[in-house]
């Protein structure tokens, strides 16, 4: 793998830190070049896809994408070592998004066409490979339903289209279809094209999700019999992102509804751009995050679902601009987002897209220099290679006055440029999985590791106390706490002693069927205490200084309770995914001193039988004993600018860090 040896606006290798992770940006390298193989097309608009044994890269054969022109000869590379080395493809792959749908099966989806006489029903061109992309079968059709949507003949469009289409008004629109499209039109039985797939993804259970943008959608549109009335009612500037779902490897798709629709507002005041180019991240706990483009040089928007796509949040504008966004969730809670134009950039989030504290530009498209490889469409692709490695690909061009084509005369020869990005655990990495880590117990409920690890499982003993001897004010100065052992938290990265001036201790007690925890957090920088949130239920608690309590009872694994320095609480039931509707019923009081802040916490416990009738309130379990203990972990996060520190009760070097349930500490009541 050779590095780039020519001047260009590609940034060099770099290392950045994000919370407890180190982000290493590798050197740029050339994957393919039109100078070497001019018969492979224009080398613009890269497209990455996986089979089970190889990574494939294709690109546009022609710069004009209006009619979805596909190459008429192989134009791509494949890699069997994660993108380190590449070889030329010998098989012409069909156009359109692709996804693994079987042990050796890849499915590719192309354009969709309206079924004549059946509003809202479409047939999508489909190809399948049964040998991991080494060869492809004949085109077949896949049935789709998009309620309220009509197909559009762009060569004979309604007047509305002529008025609002940038391609039509700029002269890019062909007055008649090219010859190579006529065959497809004859097979489809119509020229009216409808919504195909723009993005494909799969969850950990093998369920496929297909996202579509640009669907011309009118609520109740299937009941509008008159074609002109449909187009008159359509708002061309308010189009949706919609989703299809398949449980049988992409053969049958079920309409799953609207992901985002700017029906209630334009994406920006006076804007003529709509939601487009979606990218979906699917988490094992059922949460989905979708990022969408709104236009060139315009902000991206994000929506999320916490119920596997049944309902979606309102769109939120991100402080990120660009095109062709691509999401890549990684273990440990890191979410990567690649964007293109105006620059080729990668962004990172530690909270599933709520905030994006780190961005790194890989290619700067401004200030292009003639006769240098300094131009690009800044269309990009991003894919995960393994648990710690990403591959980012973009195109780059060179000015060439000898080209007959006006666009290539200024843009020149194309090259596919690759960058490996490595996401590695670093100091304080335990803090990163506090919220977003999806942790599945490796043992049965209540079991602990038995060989070689018993000494690493700490134990806390709660003594019974008289509730009347406690005034819940956060000060830890009542007789209630006297005589209780103070347990110290350890460094989250090494398991060693706490940082000087940041010692954290806690005490536990039991009274009247409730667990009490008193926690003192020493802090030598109290004036700059970082308050992430001050109201209950605000997940921004995890963006600042906080305490995080994880509890597994005899019958439930597990609960999570986040507590801020103001006493604000956020709680979730993590037994089956992340259930934010659960209420801990916690009573919390906080106090701030000169060089510390402290918290007193009361957690009511309900009988498991009672919890069966009302599982959304209280901690379900029995009083923990030697023979039937609870298991828990307590962590403290401290944030000062870019510096994050994390301390824990039970340290683990395992991948789930703080959320590693098999390494939770033991809790008993004496």
Image: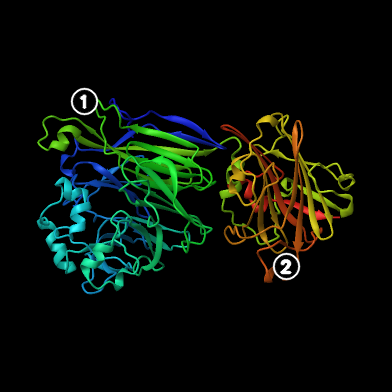
Secondary element under disc 1, as helix, strand or loop, is loop
Where in the figure is residue 555, as x and y percent of width and height?
70, 64
Q: Position of residue 519 (x, y in %)?
A: 76, 43
Question: Which residue is nearer to you in this view: 526 or 576?
Answer: 526
The residue singled out by tag 1 in the image is 370
Which residue is labeled 2 in the image? Answer: 608
Q: Residues within 10 Å of mark 2 (few under 14, many from 20)?
A: some
Residue 558: image location, x then y, percent: 66, 57
The C terminus appears in which quarter of the rendering? Answer: bottom right
Residue 443 appears left or right of 123? right
Q: Nearer the viewer, residue 232 or 171?
A: 232
Assess disc 1: are there few (<14), some (14-19) or many (≥20) residues with their C-alpha within 10 Å of its C-alpha.
few
Q: How many marks?
A: 2
Q: Tag 2 or tag 1, which sits nearer the N-term? A: 1
**Figure coloring:** rainbow
Q: CA distance from mark 1 to mark 2?
A: 72 Å
Secondary structure under badge 2? helix
Please give left or right for residue 78 compared with residue 72 in the image: right
Q: In front here: 613 or 124?
A: 613
Quarter-of-image position of residue 403 = top left
Q: Is residue 543 left or right of residue 246?
A: right
Q: Quadrant of the N terminus?
A: top left
* Residue 492 vertical placement versus 224 (above, below): above
Q: Residue at x 56, y 49 (%)?
A: 436
């Amino acid at each position: 793998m050779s590095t780039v040896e020519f001047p260009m606006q590609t940034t060099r290798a770099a290392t950045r830190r994000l919370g407890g992770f180190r982000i290493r940006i590798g050197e740029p390298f050339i994957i393919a070049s039109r100078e070497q193989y001019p018969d492979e097309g224009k080398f613009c608009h890269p497209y990455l896809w996986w089979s089970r044994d190889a990574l494939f890269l294709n690109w546009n054969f022609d710069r004009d994408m209006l009619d979805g022109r596909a190459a008429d000869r192989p134009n791509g590379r494949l890699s069997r070592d994660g993108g380190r080395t590449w070889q030329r493809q010998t098989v012409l792959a069909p156009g359109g998004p692709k996804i693994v749908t079987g042990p050796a099966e890849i499915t590719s989806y192309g354009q969709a066409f309206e079924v004549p006489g059946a509003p809202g029903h479409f047939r999508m061109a489909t190809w399948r490979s049964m040998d991991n992309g080494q060869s492809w079968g004949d085109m077949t059709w896949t049935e789709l339903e998009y309620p309220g949507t009509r197909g559009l003949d762009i060569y004979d469009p309604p007047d509305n289209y002529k008025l609002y289409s940038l391609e039509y008004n700029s002269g890019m629109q062909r007055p008649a279809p090219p010859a190579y499209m006529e065959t497809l039109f004859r097979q489809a039985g119509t020229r009216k094209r409808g919504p195909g797939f723009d993005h494909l993804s799969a969850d950990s259970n093998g369920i496929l999700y297909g996202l579509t943008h640009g669907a011309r959608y009118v609520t109740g549109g299937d009941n509008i019999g008159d074609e002109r009335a449909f187009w008159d009612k359509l708002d061309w500037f308010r189009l949706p992102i919609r989703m299809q779902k398949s449980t049988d490897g992409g053969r049958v798709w079920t309409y799953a509804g609207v992901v985002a629709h700017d029906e209630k507002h334009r994406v920006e005041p006076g804007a003529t751009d709509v939601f487009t180019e979606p990218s979906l991240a699917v988490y094992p706990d059922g949460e989905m995050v979708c990022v969408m483009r709104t236009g060139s040089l315009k902000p991206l928007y994000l929506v999320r679902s916490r119920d596997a796509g049944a309902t979606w949040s309102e769109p939120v504008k991100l402080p990120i601009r660009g095109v062709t966004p691509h999401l890549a969730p990684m273990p440990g809670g890191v979410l990567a987002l690649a964007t293109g134009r105006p620059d080729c950039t990668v962004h990172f989030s530690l909270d599933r897209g709520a905030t994006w504290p780190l961005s790194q530009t890989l290619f700067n498209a401004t200030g292009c220099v003639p006769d240098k490889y300094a131009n690009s469409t800044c269309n990009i692709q991003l894919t995960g290679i393994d648990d710690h490695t990403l591959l980012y690909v973009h195109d780059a061009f060179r000015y060439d006055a000898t080209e007959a084509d006006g666009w290539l005369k200024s843009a020149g020869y194309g090259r596919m440029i690759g960058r490996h990005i490595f996401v590695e655990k670093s100091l304080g990495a335990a803090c990163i999985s506090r919220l977003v880590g999806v942790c599945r117990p490796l043992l049965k409920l209540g079991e602990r590791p038995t060989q070689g690890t018993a000494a690493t499982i700490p134990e806390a003993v709660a003594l019974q106390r008289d509730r009347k001897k406690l005034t819940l004010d956060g000060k830890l100065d009542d007789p209630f706490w006297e005589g209780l052992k103070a347990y110290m938290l350890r460094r989250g990265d090494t398991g060693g002693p706490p940082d000087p001036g940041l010692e954290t201790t806690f005490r536990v007690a039991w009274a009247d069927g409730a667990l009490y925890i008193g926690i003192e957090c020493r802090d030598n920088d109290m004036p700059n205490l970082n308050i992430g949130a001050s109201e209950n239920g605000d997940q921004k608690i995890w963006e600042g200084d906080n305490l995080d309590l994880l509890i597994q009872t005899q019958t439930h694994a597990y609960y999570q309770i986040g507590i801020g320095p103001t006493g604000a609480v956020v709680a979730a039931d993590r037994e089956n995914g992340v259930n934010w509707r659960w209420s801990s019923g916690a009573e919390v009081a906080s106090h701030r001193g000169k060089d510390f802040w402290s918290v007193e916490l009361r957690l009511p416990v309900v009988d498991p039988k009672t919890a069966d009738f009302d599982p959304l309130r209280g901690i379900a379990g029995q009083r923990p004993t030697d023979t039937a203990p609870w298991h828990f972990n307590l962590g403290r996060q401290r944030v000062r600018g870019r510096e994050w520190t994390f301390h824990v009760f039970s340290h683990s070097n395992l991948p789930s860090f703080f959320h590693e349930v098999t390494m939770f500490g033991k809790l008993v009541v004496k």
